């Protein structure tokens, strides 16, 4: 998309002073995230409480081979450890395939067609979840569809704006609201249907959400950026030679990727062992004038996206206040604080586990406190990491390094599944203490790494970070 084209489209503003296409991308992403988080809210509970139980597991195509493969790697696995391992592999692969989806869009099909293909695959996958014998094939469709969809719709947001347009950052903030709005609504709709009416109703609702996402995208196609797909045989762009400072920046990012993997491994327990804690160890009874009953387990998955809405303005205001006084933490220190937040959140859960040792279920307020702290940690690391990559990555390989950075979600989720497999065999206080120790060690490692960087002369890019 040329700068002139972007500017022309940008003048056609109807959504908070932004291009018309942002409205459709916002709606598309909101409903796609609704489908993803709606299905994810049910996934572990569905496997543990129904699908992987002995009387049902043999009906699932490929169950024996997949269980044997995991047990070859990890040893014997009961129902819960196997469910957590499957969860970790699924959520991990969801963040691996976007690397290939971006390449396919850039070099073969273009973003629009790749997004549409991804949406169709995901819709099919969600509806396949309603048929338990197709479970693993449904996960495969969702993984492939997400890989085609996720990287390309995000890049289309930036393509709505001409180079240097200062509204771009605000556009991504608006887009991020769409992500979390969908994630917030999903547990209430899909989760409630799955728990109260039947698992298949919840998965079907996620499929309906994906169909709506596809419809919104097709409706807004004329307002979206035009693809410039390279033609076969076109002259390749001459790449600039990387400097010594560029290689230092790349090395710094790769080291940080190792540490950030442990952040995601501990943070992603939310949809795994934290869901199991909410289901089996939390007092979910509520007694209000207008409603008495039990809070559905999946509703706790809405806490994190809701708190993102609530906390983001205050976090940004805090950083602004600190910046005016010259006390705003550096980008890397913020990331260390993000890991520290996850460690503190799990220390809170150690207290919850002690509270439940008497035999009574723990108060739901423990989970409220957990989500408050872990969400703050997320806001200090997740968007900040993307900002760091955009600041210090050499321009000639920015997209590739952004893909490498997103791979930390892949490796982190795989590790999250492995850690979750210890849930059944460990005392719950010990389990949460283990997770807190891992996140705390990552925080210390990132902080030390920042000290090492500041001791040597920084490149101009690193200094700005």
Image (cartoon, rainbow, N blue to C red):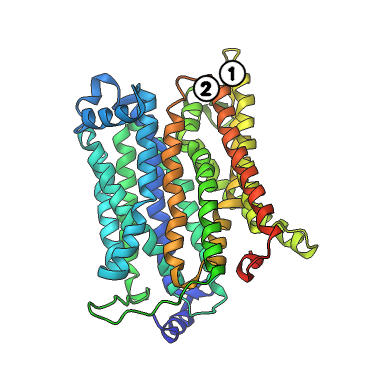
| Position above or below: 269 against 292 | below
Query: Circle 1 — which element?
Result: helix
Where's the N terminus, which quadrant?
A: bottom left
- Residue 423 in view of the camera: yes
Q: Observer-nearest residue: 377 or 6? A: 377
Q: Position of residue 364 (x, y in %)?
A: 58, 29
Circles 2 and 1, Cβ within 8 Å, touching? The answer is yes
- Name the residue rendered at 32%, 33% in the picture: 199
**Can you identify the residue that label 1 sits on?**
356
Q: Residues within 10 Å of mark 1 (few under 14, many from 20)?
A: some
Query: Taking 114 as reference, is 29 left or right?
Result: right
**Can you identify the residue that label 2 sits on?**
281
Q: Position of residue 381 (x, y in %)?
A: 58, 51
- Name the residue rendered at 71%, 58% in the picture: 455
Taking the view exactly as shown, the residue that stands out farthest to the right is: 325
Q: Earlier in the sequence, mark 2 or mark 1?
A: 2
């Amino acid at each position: 998309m040329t700068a002139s084209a972007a500017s022309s489209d940008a003048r056609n503003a109807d959504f908070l002073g932004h291009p018309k296409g942002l409205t459709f991308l916002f709606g598309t992403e909101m409903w796609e995230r609704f489908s993803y988080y709606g299905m994810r809210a049910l996934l572990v509970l569905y496997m543990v409480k129904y699908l992987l139980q002995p009387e049902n597991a043999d009906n699932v195509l490929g169950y024996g081979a997949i269980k044997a493969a995991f047990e070859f790697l990890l040893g014997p696995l009961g129902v819960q450890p196997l469910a957590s391992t499957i969860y970790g592999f699924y959520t991990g692969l969801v963040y691996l395939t976007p690397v290939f989806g971006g390449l396919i869009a850039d070099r073969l099909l273009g973003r629009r067609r790749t997004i549409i293909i991804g949406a169709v695959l995901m819709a099919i996958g969600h509806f396949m979840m309603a048929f338990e014998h197709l479970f693993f094939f449904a996960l495969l469709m969702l993984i492939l569809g997400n890989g085609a969809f996720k990287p390309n719709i995000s890049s289309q947001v930036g393509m709505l704006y001409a180079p240097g347009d200062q509204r771009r950052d605000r556009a991504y903030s608006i887009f991020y609201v769409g992500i979390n709005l969908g994630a917030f609504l999903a547990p209430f709709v899909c989760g409630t249907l799955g728990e109260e009416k039947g698992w298949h109703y919840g998965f079907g609702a996620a499929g309906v959400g994906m169909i709506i996402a596809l419809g919104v995208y097709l409706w807004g196609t004329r307002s979206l950026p035009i693809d410039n797909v390279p033609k076969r045989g076109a002259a390749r762009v001459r790449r600039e030679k990387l400097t010594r400072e560029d290689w230092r920046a790349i090395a710094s990012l790769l080291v940080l990727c190792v540490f950030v993997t442990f952040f995601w491994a501990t943070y992603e327990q939310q949809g795994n062992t934290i869901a199991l804690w909410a289901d089996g160890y939390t007092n979910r009874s509520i007694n209000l004038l207008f409603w008495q009953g039990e809070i559905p387990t999946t509703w706790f998955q809405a806490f994190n996206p809701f708190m993102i809405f609530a906390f983001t303005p205050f976090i940004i205001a805090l950083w602004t206040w600190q910046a005016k006084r010259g006390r705003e933490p550096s980008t890397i220190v913020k990331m260390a604080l993000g890991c520290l937040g996850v460690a503190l959140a799990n220390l809170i859960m150690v207290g919850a586990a002690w509270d439940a040792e008497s035999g009574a279920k723990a108060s739901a307020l423990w989970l409220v406190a957990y989500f408050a702290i872990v969400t703050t940690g997320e806001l200090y690391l997740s968007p900040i990491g993307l900002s760091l990559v955009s600041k210090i990555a050499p321009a000639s390989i920015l997209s590739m390094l952004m893909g490498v950075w997103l791979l930390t979600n892949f490796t982190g989720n795989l590790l999250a599944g492995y850690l979750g497999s210890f849930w059944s065999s460990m005392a719950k206080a010990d389990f949460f203490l283990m997770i807190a120790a891992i996140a705390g060690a990552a925080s210390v490692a990132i902080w030390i790494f920042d000290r090492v960087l500041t001791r040597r002369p920084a490149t101009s890019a690193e200094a700005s970070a």
